[in-house]
Amino acid sequence: HFGSSTEGTRLQRLGRCFRKYITTIPTMKTFAAIILASLGFSGFHAAKVKAQEKMALSAAAGSGMPSPWLALLAQSWSLAGTPSSKKEATLKNMAEDIVKLAKNTDMKSDPSMVTAVNSIRSLLDDMINSINSTNVDAQTGLDDKADAVIACQAPTVPAQPHLQTPRPQPTQTNVTHCRDQQQTIENTYQACLDLQRRCRGNVLCCDPVIQPEGGHGWCNETPKPSFSFGAVSLCYSAPSASQCSITQLSTELAYWQGLLNRYDQKVSACESVMAGCPTPAGTPVDCTAEHNAVIAKRAECDAVQSDFETHYCSYATSVGTMWDNYTTCYNTNMAILSTGETAEHTNLPNRQQQYRAILRIRCLLDVLVGDSADMTTALEACIAARYDVTSINWLNIAFPTNSSSFPALQTCTTQMWEPGSSSFETYFYNNHTLISDSLSETHGCVGRSSLQHCPVRSFSASSATHHATSEEF
């Protein structure tokens, strides 16, 4: 390929090779012009090629050289630029023209032409070296791009927080222990509230038989009228006790004993239901301390739970970032490699075609300066040769992605635990009743991180039946 900075230098060398022939020998002036025109296939600018061809045609006309010969050489040396679909037809036409020209017995090898041909051979060697160098650079470029892809290593994902050593603090056990303590405190507070409600009064303390003294002021409704005793016994109204018989006295005793028993029963019932209530009656039960203890313990346990769940939020973010970086690295460098391989799928055949054209030019030059007894056959052999270069190692490309060992893009298989999900609370907390479901900073944190590469663990039968033990934490 001659689209590089060396193009001008080589053009100058080619000019120096033929300057004396162009200026002194009309025939060689034409031949050199033809060569200059024909070398346009190697990458010289189209404008230069057109100018050289125009000069060659003009020189040929001035020297009397047959234009079919000029056309034949132009066809041969510009073969690399001929579309594949037209090459067979071009080769056939050239073969026919060569057969006709070979019948011209005046065609001889000129010593000056031999000198020029040797110079052209040297230039063709440089062109082969350039093709080789370009191919090496292309292979190196693809290999470097492939190395960049290979360097993108899938991340080594650390163990889940509860499986790490040492374990991050706090652990699941700290959470459940704190919630157990909270449960005890909340039970105490609930008992205080129950006492508070009881000590407001009870209907059992409102029975008339114990009013007003026996109820101790714990009647929670308007007291009924005081108990009305039966008719006063004659023993009370008689002028003397002698008027009261033993029977009457026994009856009176039984009556009053029954009232006393009833009184004792009602008082006992009232006092039992109001047991633990402060005295005197009406003194309020203060549950402020118990309430404050609940609030403080709840906040403490929420903080412990939040700290524990934060491990899984941070873990998901960290692992997600690892996979983001790896995937971006792989896809970015893979796109660069793919672009390079796509270009080489076009460039490689072009270089091979250039080399085939050079081989054909070498063959034609050898015939021109050789002593072939049958020039027609020799020329036809040059034209007919296919110059298969596909088996030439230095003129091939090993495409990295065709290798079975070339790494494919890896995917994340680590399932993320989502705080607040049913699987999380079943596995880690055994569905503890006091686990908070209002920790907005941690609950749903994995979903909010918009993981693109790692799956979120879903609820399953195994997670429902397995509960994390202290050994796992």
Image (cartoon, grey):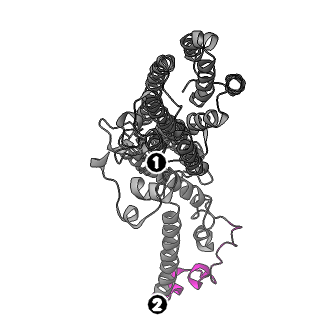
- Residue at image x 43%, y 30%? 366
Front residue of 126 and 251: 126
Q: Of helix, strand and loop, which one carries label 2? A: helix
Q: Position of residue 220 (x, y in %)?
A: 66, 64
Bounds of the magenta segment: 221-248
Regarding residue 439, the answer to whether it shows in the image is no
Residue underneath mark 2: 247
In terms of secondary structure, what is the magenta stretch mainly? loop
- Residue at image x 42%, y 40%? 374
Front residue of 410 and 182: 410
Q: Quadrant of the C terminus?
A: top left
Q: Position of residue 469 (x, y in %)?
A: 31, 52
Is 381 covered by the magenta stretch?
Answer: no
Regarding residue 203, the answer to whether it shows in the image is yes
> In the drawing, does residue 194 fall left or right of residue 371?
right
Q: Of helix, strand and loop, which one carries label 1? A: helix
Is 236 covered by the magenta stretch?
Answer: yes
Q: CA distance from mark 1 to mark 2?
A: 67 Å
Q: Quadrant of the N terminus?
A: top right
Front residue of 424 and 81: 81
Q: Position of residue 242 (x, y in %)?
A: 50, 84
Q: Nearer the viewer, mark 1 or mark 2?
A: 1
Residue underneath mark 1: 182
Q: Is the residue 6 above or below the residue 149 in the image? A: above
Tag shown at residue 12: none
- Residue at image x 49%, y 73%? 265
> In the drawing, does residue 435 fall left or right of residue 57?
left
